[in-house]
Amino acid sequence: MWKKIGLLLVATIIILILGYTFGLEWYQKYKNQQQLVEIKDVDTENYQIFKDFIYEIEDKTDWKVLIVSGYRTEEEQEILKKINTKNASAGKSKHNFAKAIDICLYKRKFIFSRWLLKSSSKKRWEESSIIQIAEKYNLNWGGNFKNYHDPVHFEVK
């Protein structure tokens, strides 16, 4: 009896972990679509560029994309400027015109993930091959900014 309960418990845990893992990935794709739709509502050309950029990353690398920020209102930009004075002012950020996205990248192996984040080094981002894909779409990369390390930022030139 205890053996059956143990097996049932292990099976339940595995199902929960798989459900969480795949549910989280579905949710991230859903959130990406929402971010892209907001860009599309402002600029369909930039929407297509960012959509193709993201799809190519996921098709040609083993990285998955999470759009952290896309289009921002001026009010949202003002809040971000207050949080970090290095952020662009409202009305001067490319995000305010649907010309920029901020993304994080992740690789998932079962329940473990490896991330490329804003705090990740320029070298790690360059090794990911994402920068070469961005160049193909004529996107500026925030990792090349002179006064601010912003490797999650990609903007239309």
Image (cartoon, rainbow, N blue to C red):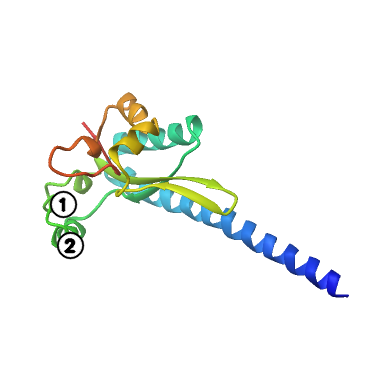
Q: Name the residue carrying label 1.
A: 87
Expressed as whole percent of the image width and height from the top left, the position of residue 6 reads 79, 70
Which residue shows up at 33% across the image and 43% down it? 40
Would you call the spot at circle 2 few (<14 residues within 10 Å), some (14-19), or many (20 or more)? few
The C terminus sits in image quarter:
top left
Mark identifier at residue 83? 2
| Residue 44 on image: x %, y % | 32, 38
Element under disc 1: loop
Residue sitting at 40 percent across and 33 percent down? 52
Q: What's the amino acid at mark 2?
A: Ile
- The extreme bottom residue here reads 1
Marking on residue 97: none
Left/right of residue 84 with respect to residue 143 in the rendered view: left
The residue shown at (37%, 28%) is 133
Say if mark 2 contacts mark 1, CB within 8 Å.
Answer: yes
**Which residue is at a point 80% across and 66% down the rendered structure image?**
7
**Horizontal side, residue 68 vs residue 55: left or right:** left
